């Protein structure tokens, strides 16, 4: 009986999740009257504005991932090694972006770094892009920190550090050649989640008036019939592609550990 309820719950959950996606995908194929076609996807992928905004978001995501790794990995490593009592505080701080709306963050940036301030970053495209990446780094902080911290739990950080120090390694070598390679799967998990978040983000990019993929999806919605559905399917495919790559990285890491 328990198994029946489990399967029933699984089927209902799958239908609840899959039916809207199937309906959206089916609608996106109706651009040609009387038959299904991929005309909508050809129109979307061939749109120069789509290509420009998507490339902009991809570059922003990659920069955000690099910044996240440079900040989170050393911080999580140091907290676990030297400040274990501070872990609850650091975890609480890392979760704050989940409870602070992105609109508050964006307005804070605009107010603090407007053209009348001492650091007028909003006065140039490069400065605004820096604010955008900073905002993305804050949004991705909970996911990157959780992924790295989970990876550090599986390592004997103190022993690895002492062994490396006994061989004459400095902190940079320890982080770059000892800790980071052992955290590769966790870092990749955080990176893929960050990529998925940045690609679909709308609020900060729209308020800072940057040509990102999120505002493009919203902009094209009222003006086209089938393209918004195609964009939704593409965005969903990107997100699930990132999730699949994350699982693949974790499996490869486990397989390598078993071989050792």
Image (tube, helix red, strand yellow):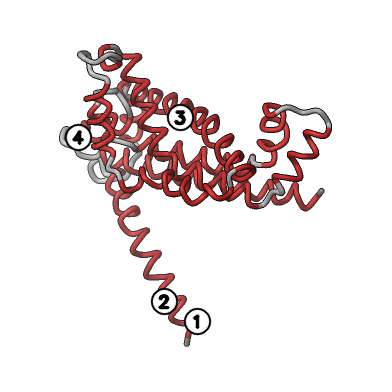
Which label sits in the foreground, 4 or 2? 2
Residue placed under numbered mark 2 in the picture: 8
How much space separates mark 3 and mark 4, taking CA atoms? Answer: 31 Å
Q: Are marks 1 and 3 in contact (CB under 8 Å)?
A: no
Name the foreground residue: 24 vs 176: 176
Which label sits in the foreground, 3 or 2? 3
How much space separates mark 1 and mark 3, taking CA atoms? Answer: 44 Å
How much space separates mark 2 and mark 1, taking CA atoms? Answer: 8 Å
Please tell me which of labels 4 and 2 falls first in the chain: 2
Q: Position of residue 65 (x, y in %)?
A: 49, 31
Name the foreground residue: 28 vs 155: 155
Q: Which mark is residue 3?
A: 1
Q: Secondary structure at mark 1?
A: helix
Q: Is residue 2 above or below residue 187?
A: below
Task: Name the residue rendered at 25%, 30% in the picture.
Answer: 108
Q: Is residue 171 left or right of residue 85?
A: right
Task: Using a 10 Å C-alpha cutoff, classify the residue at mark 2 as few (fewer than 14 neighbours), some (14 to 19) or many (20 or more).
Answer: few
Which label sits in the foreground, 1 or 3? 3
Q: Position of residue 77 (x, y in %)?
A: 61, 40
How much space separates mark 4 and mark 2, taking CA atoms? Answer: 38 Å
How much space separates mark 1 and mark 4, taking CA atoms? Answer: 46 Å
Task: Using a 10 Å C-alpha cutoff, classify the residue at mark 4 as few (fewer than 14 neighbours), some (14 to 19) or many (20 or more).
Answer: few
- The image quadrant of residue 70 is top right
Residue placed under numbered mark 4 in the picture: 224
Q: Is residue 144 above or below residue 137?
A: below
Farthest residue, direction bottom: 1
Q: Position of residue 190 (x, y in %)?
A: 52, 41
> How many labels, in total?
4
Residue placed under numbered mark 3 in the picture: 64
How much space separates mark 3 and mark 2, taking CA atoms? Answer: 41 Å
């Amino acid at each position: 009986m328990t198994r029946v309820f489990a399967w029933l719950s699984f089927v209902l959950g799958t239908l609840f999740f899959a039916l809207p996606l199937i309906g959206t995908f089916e609608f996106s194929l109706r651009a040609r009257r009387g038959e299904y076609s991929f005309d909508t996807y050809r129109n979307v992928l061939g749109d120069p504005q789509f290509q420009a905004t998507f490339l902009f978001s991809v570059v922003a995501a990659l920069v955000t991932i690099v910044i996240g790794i440079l900040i989170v990995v050393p911080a999580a490593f140091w907290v676990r090694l030297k400040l274990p009592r501070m872990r609850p505080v650091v975890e609480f701080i890392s979760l704050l972006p989940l409870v602070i709306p992105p609109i508050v963050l964006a307005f804070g940036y605009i107010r603090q770094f407007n053209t009348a301030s001492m650091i007028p970053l909003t006065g140039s495209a490069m400065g605004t892009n820096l604010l955008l990446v900073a905002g993305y780094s804050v949004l991705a902080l909970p996911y990157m920190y959780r992924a790295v911290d989970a990876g550090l739990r599986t390592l004997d950080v103190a022993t690895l550090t002492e062994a490396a120090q006994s061989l004459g390694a400095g902190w940079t070598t320890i982080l770059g050649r000892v800790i980071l390679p052992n955290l590769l799967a966790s870092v990749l998990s955080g990176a893929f989640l960050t990529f998925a978040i940045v690609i679909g983000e709308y609020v900060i990019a729209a308020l800072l008036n940057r040509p990102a993929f999120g505002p493009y999806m919203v902009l094209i919605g009222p003006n086209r019939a089938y393209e918004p559905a195609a964009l939704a399917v593409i965005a969903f495919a990107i997100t699930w592609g990132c999730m699949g790559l994350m699982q693949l990285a974790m499996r490869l890491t486990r397989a390598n550990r078993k071989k050792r």
